[in-house]
Amino acid sequence: MALNLVGISRSNCLFGLVDDSRFYKKNLEGGRSKIVSDTVEQKSNRTIEEETRRRRTFAIIAHPDAGKTTLTEKLLLYGGAIQLAGAVKARKNRKAATSDWMEMEKEKGISITSAALQFEYSGHVLNLLDTPGHEDFSEDTYRTLIAADTAVMVLDAGKGVEPQTIKLFKVCRDRGIPIVTFINKMDRPTKNLFSLLDEIEKVLEISAVPMVWPIGTGVDFSGVYSRKDKKILTYDKTPGGSQKSTFQTSGVNDPELDSRFEDWVIKTFREELELVEGGISEFSQEDFLDSKITPVFFGSAVNNFGIQLFLDEFIKIAPPPLFFPLKDGSKLDPIQTPFSGFIFKVQANMNRQHRDRIAFLRVTSGKFERGLNVLHGRLGKSVKLSSSFAFFGQDRNTVDEAYPGDIIGLVNPGTYAIGDIVASSKVPDLKSLPVFAPELFATISSSDTSSMKSFRKGIDQLAEEGILHLFSSQTIGGGLPIIGAMGQLQFEVFRRRLLDEYNAPSTITILPYVISCWIGQEDLGKVPSSANLVTDRGGRAALLFDTEWDKGYFQKKNPEITLLDYPPSI
């Protein structure tokens, strides 16, 4: 059985994930005191429940340039996963990010693929899903968010809530996962802080609850004050930045504040904090898990400031792995159910030395062990999970065991597709992954007849990744492969990867169509010969239209044909 791919438009998500706050609360009780230390003996003796309780699987979402990749690297830095974060100056000139491996990502300074990175911090295992930073790759981002239990929303303090943030937030809201907000770039010119909070509440329709409050902004940014424990973290303005010191206060009127900060800075801070304490409610774990509030942190990722404080609080409030919903309305228990997982991403050529394809699997229940024989739901046969890896940029390490919330990579000889479910016993009927109807179309042809074999191989393998749709047609495109995408950059990446990874130069010619609709097999014989009929990789028929008017006219003339926004199941 596979996760049926359910279609969505950019404005309408037709999938969801229901949380179970009782499970969250049970697993969060006791905080760090119940976390088992990482000796070899203790690690081997941990139960599935203990390992699950330690997991935090989260994705970082942001509008391009808000600082998502920088925050990702600094979290890895504090987690001890890397020794040096990329120095972020001009994006073109910066060191390539650890989570970015594709040549175009290194050149452009944007995240095009979704990477899964694991590191340990303070007794917890964190699975960080780095999502594409460009809106043209929103389908890949949406699928990644299906695999996450929490989202971290990064906002630029000078820009606030931006368009891509709104789209991604809506996905998280529809998913039912809690969202933590990190307001970045506090050392640069910012919007009014209360305007930022008000913008979050009005635009995103969620209450914003500051966990800390900044002391000054821009060039006067001097630190942050923790509302919970009344500690102040001071900001070191030396190059590179870091936390300089933490000191305990007796409260906002502690005289030590006057001796440490400029008079007008501390005066403004006290006035602002008085408004915060008087007008903004305290953090509620229950409301957070119910997605009614978003806890807000402030800092400067590029200068390492506020990261550790954020990380310390995040592992306390973020939920362990979710109960995944099943189509019948029940939920999959991650602890009591035997091993199961679903494929949310397929990637070709992650490492030039290996030249293999990798299927990324999110463990939804039970314990994974390398060499495990499982039932492949879609194929209806048993497969052995013997080649399993964890990835860190281009580096890979063998994974011998994994638990709910973990992401593992499986070598994919063509066995796995996005949406596939595997399980050691009965295959669970999980809810669906999203599919986007493409909005741009083009033909693609080989520019070098001597590389046709590589061209065809590249077309098939890259289309497997689901970053665009591959169609064929006898009536349009002159018999050439037709590719459909959400944005122009997907075409550029596709052409570049054919060249870089398969040595297959190609030419892309844009087609006039901007709308696609699938039709059921029962309607295929009713389609008039003048229609722009295409067939996707799964053998399903679809129609392409130039405009919404053309689509409406077709429906008026052919009311017996049902137009579908997503592919029908075969």
Image (cartoon, helix red, strand yellow):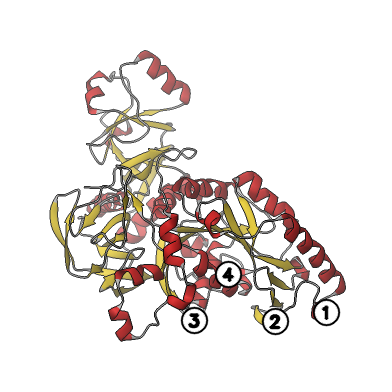
Q: How many C-alpha atoms fall within 10 Å of the one at disc 1: few (<14), some, or many (≥20)? A: few
- Badge 2 density bin: few <14, some 14–19, many ≥20, Cα 10 Å: few
The answer to whether one can see residue 426 in this image is yes
Q: Which image quadrant for residue 424? A: bottom left
Between marks 3 and 4, how big is the CA–CA gap? Answer: 19 Å
N-terminal-most mark, 3 or 4: 3
In the depicted structure, whether residue 458 falls above or below residue 221: above
> Closest to the observer: 252 or 355?
252
User: Cα distance, mark 1 to mark 4?
Assistant: 26 Å
Residue at label 3?
83
Label 2: state its secondary structure.
strand
* Label drawn at residue 247: 2
CB atoms at circles 3 and 2 under 8 Å apart?
no
Q: Nearest the camera: 168 or 133? A: 168
**Cα distance, mark 3 to mark 1?**
38 Å
Residue at the far top: name it: 557
**Disc 3, SS:** loop
**N-term mark: 3 or 1:** 3
Q: Amino acid at mark 2?
A: Phe
Q: Is residue 100 visible?
A: no
The x and y percentages for residue 298 are: 65, 65
Residue at mark 1: 255
Comparing labels 4 and 2, the label whose residue is closer to the camera? 2
Give the residue type at disc 4: Phe
Nearer the observer, disc 1 or disc 4?
A: 1
| Three-letter amino acid code at the position of disc 1 | Pro
